[in-house]
């Protein structure tokens, strides 16, 4: 029977196919792979297609925009597993670059943002934006609005924001940048002004049996006050008042420009500042005050949207790939330094930043370097090491190194930054704190008795580093001399890097913390300062408030009749910072500086500058 089957037509066909089974399988596999590749390519083209009149949709919850993405933790993996679609997260630079790209893209009609925090996985990190980060996004959105008005020449809003409620006032400030702001009828606008709470633990330490010795240079350096005082000393309280007052005024000025610009800058700012004294506001109250444009539920808001839509995060990916292929775009290396400046190894630490800087310096296709700093300082030795790295790279490669301060760039961070070609800061960046602080705790017998512990110490040399022994008079003098020397070295480096005279620097240093705007204003010539609004350099006064809770409170208000300080003396040099601006501004400046330093035969004839492409070295990434 098998012979009959084999000799039949079916059998002969099967036999032939079996003999060529190898080539047939290969052909079928290749065909399947090619077909699959074609299908994927078509799907990708469909996803990347941007139709004319597209609105970019932006889910702008707390944590949707971060300074840098951290390595995936167990928490983030669980959050992704608990949600069918993990909410997109953009780095601040990615969000701003996408907005800038959309500004020039004629296919993009507008941006629609949803600031609601509802329907998010519980384990999603809720990282709120700082005021300085909001500033950078606001500037990008303002430029986008102006560009779209010129492109489409109609009255339709280019930016619309909706939320069920606002969880914090910085979220509302960002939303106020949008041309239309809608909120659910039961929502709230928590517009309440600036606040700071400083805990003091001296009594707790004394009760435990720990004595703390503090050395600061100078009286405005407040790092150790929590441990050695029961309240802020008068000079530090005045500095805090100035800082909070400036932040309040910046917030009010931005809000006034966003919502009440028809009143004029000064009147709009005063109107916004007055509203911050009476908040928070219900949706109805916010509507009456002009803080929002209407009350809508989400389905009502969604039904108003017409035209094709594309998520902003997806648009950012699409346009980022195109930007990387731009041959004329200057390549600017971006290195991050986040958190305390010390010798600890962690993502975006000082160690990571140093490795990233060295790597960028060795790459021949890098035109300039931007060091993005978000740090309140730290270890003086590590700060000086970073300072030396910047000095070495500038001297060895002749490439521009520009520092961009994010939310904070103070103390050791400023120490590092003075070695750069230029320093950029936002108006609300916390900066300065040019000073030194040392704190030495001593464990007394009282704590040992509480723990029922006895300690017997033996020394072959000095006991100056022992936390179980007080400093004697000779040791205390040496410690004070070391602190003085460190402070003098800090001042010398600022003078060397910024060209500021000692007389001017003594007024700006001593541990004084200030906003980026005040740091910039303090060293402006009189004629330039006179062109700016008068509220930029106000003085502030404090008054103690009685509170039923018993917690001491201090009110901060502008001092009546104060005007900007007039100081026409020489010696301001380049000032504490070179320019007000964000990361994008710093990158453009670095690219322009690199172009200007090229040899004449290397430079482009017309000096036409393309938008810089930010390149992340392998280190300093946090991933």
Image (spheres, grey):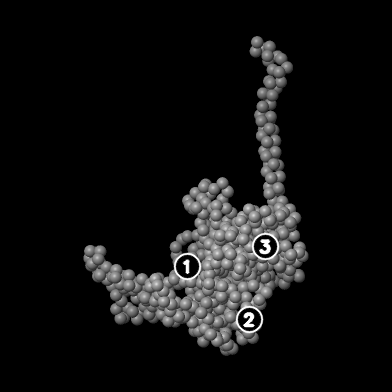
Image spot of residue 394 (x, y percent): 58, 71
| Dot 2 crowding, Cα within 10 Å, few <14, some 14–19, many 20+ | few
Q: Viewer-proximal residue, 278 or 104? A: 278
Q: Is residue 163 above or below residue 393?
A: above
The quadrant in which residue 465 appears is bottom left
Image spot of residue 399 (x, y percent): 62, 69
Q: Residue at x 25, y 64 (%)?
A: 451
| Dot 3 crowding, Cα within 10 Å, few <14, some 14–19, many 20+ | many
Total residue callouts:
3
Q: Which one is in front in this view, the residue at disc 2 or the one at disc 3?
A: 3
Where is mark 3, residue-wise? 159
The quadrant in which residue 328 appears is bottom right
Q: Residue at x 71, y 48 (%)?
A: 45
Calculate the distance from the C-alpha at mark 1 to the C-alpha at mark 3: 39 Å
Image spot of residue 419 (x, y percent): 55, 74
Where is mark 1, residue-wise? 341
Q: Earlier in the sequence, mark 2 or mark 3?
A: 3
Looking at the image, the residue that sits furthest to the bottom is: 569
Q: Residue at x 29, y 70 (%)?
A: 207
Where is mark 2, residue-wise? 532
Image spot of residue 521 (x, y percent): 58, 80
Q: Which one is in front in this view, the residue at disc 1 or the one at disc 3?
A: 3
């Amino acid at each position: 029977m098998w012979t009959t089957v084999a000799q039949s037509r079916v059998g002969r066909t099967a036999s032939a196919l079996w003999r060529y089974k190898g080539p047939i399988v290969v052909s079928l596999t290749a065909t399947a792979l090619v077909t699959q590749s074609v299908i994927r390519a078509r799907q990708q083209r469909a996803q990347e297609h941007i139709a004319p009149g597209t609105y970019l949709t932006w889910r702008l919850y707390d944590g949707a925009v971060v300074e840098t993405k951290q390595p995936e933790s167990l928490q983030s993996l669980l959050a992704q597993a608990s949600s069918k679609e993990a909410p997109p997260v953009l780095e601040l630079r990615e969000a701003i670059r996408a907005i800038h790209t959309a500004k020039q893209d004629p296919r993009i009609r507008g941006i629609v943002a949803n600031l609601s925090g509802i329907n998010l996985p519980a384990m999603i990190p809720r990282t709120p934006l700082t005021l300085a980060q909001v500033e950078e996004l606001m500037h990008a959105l303002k430029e986008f609005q102006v560009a779209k008005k010129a492109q489409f020449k109609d009255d339709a809003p280019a930016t619309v924001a909706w939320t069920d409620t606002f969880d914090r006032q910085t979220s509302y400030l960002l939303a106020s940048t949008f041309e239309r702001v809608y909120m659910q009828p039961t929502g709230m606008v928590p517009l309440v002004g600036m606040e700071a709470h400083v805990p003091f633990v001296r009594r707790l330490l004394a009760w435990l049996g720990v004595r703390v010795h503090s050395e600061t240079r100078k009286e405005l350096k407040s790092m150790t006050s929590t441990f050695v005082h029961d309240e802020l000393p008068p000079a530090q309280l005045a500095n805090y008042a100035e800082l909070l007052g400036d932040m309040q005024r910046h917030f009010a000025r931005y809000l006034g420009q966003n919502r009440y610009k028809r009143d004029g800058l000064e009147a709009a700012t005063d109107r916004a500042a007055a509203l911050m004294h009476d908040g928070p506001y219900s949706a109805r109250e916010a509507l009456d005050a002009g803080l929002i444009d209407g009350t809508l539920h989400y389905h009502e808001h969604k039904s108003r949207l017409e035209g094709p839509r594309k998520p902003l995060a997806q648009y950012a990916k699409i346009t980022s790939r195109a930007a990387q292929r731009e041959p004329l775009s200057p390549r600017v290396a971006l290195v991050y330094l986040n958190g305390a400046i010390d010798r600890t190894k962690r993502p975006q630490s000082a160690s990571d930043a140093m490795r990233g800087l060295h790597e960028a310096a060795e790459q021949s296709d890098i035109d300039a370097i931007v060091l993005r700093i978000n740090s309140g300082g730290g270890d003086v030795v590590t700060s000086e090491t970073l300072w030396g790295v910047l000095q070495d790279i500038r001297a060895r490669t002749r490439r521009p190194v520009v520092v961009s301060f994010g939310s904070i760039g103070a103390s050791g961070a400023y120490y590092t930054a003075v070695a750069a070609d230029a320093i950029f800061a936002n108006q609300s960046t916390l900066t300065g704190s040019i000073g030194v602080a040392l704190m030495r705790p001593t464990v007394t017998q009282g704590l040992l008795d509480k723990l029922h512990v006895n300690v017997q110490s033996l020394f072959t040399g000095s006991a100056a580093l022992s936390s179980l022994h007080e400093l004697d008079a000779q040791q205390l003098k040496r410690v004070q001399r070391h602190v003085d020397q460190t402070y003098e070295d800090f001042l010398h480096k600022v003078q060397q890097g910024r060209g500021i005279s000692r007389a001017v620097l003594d007024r700006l240093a001593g541990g004084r913390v200030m906003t980026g705007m005040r740091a910039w204003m303090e060293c402006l010539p009189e004629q330039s300062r006179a062109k700016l609004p008068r509220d930029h350099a106000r003085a502030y006064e404090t008054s103690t408030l009685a509170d039923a809770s018993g917690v001491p409170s201090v009110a901060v208000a502008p001092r009546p009749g104060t005007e900007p300080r007039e100081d026409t003396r020489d010696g301001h040099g380049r000032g504490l910072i070179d320019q007000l601006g964000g990361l994008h501004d710093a990158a453009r400046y670095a690219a322009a500086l690199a172009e200007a330093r090229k040899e004449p035969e290397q430079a482009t004839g017309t000096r036409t500058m393309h938008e810089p492409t930010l390149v992340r070295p392998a280190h300093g990434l946090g991933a």
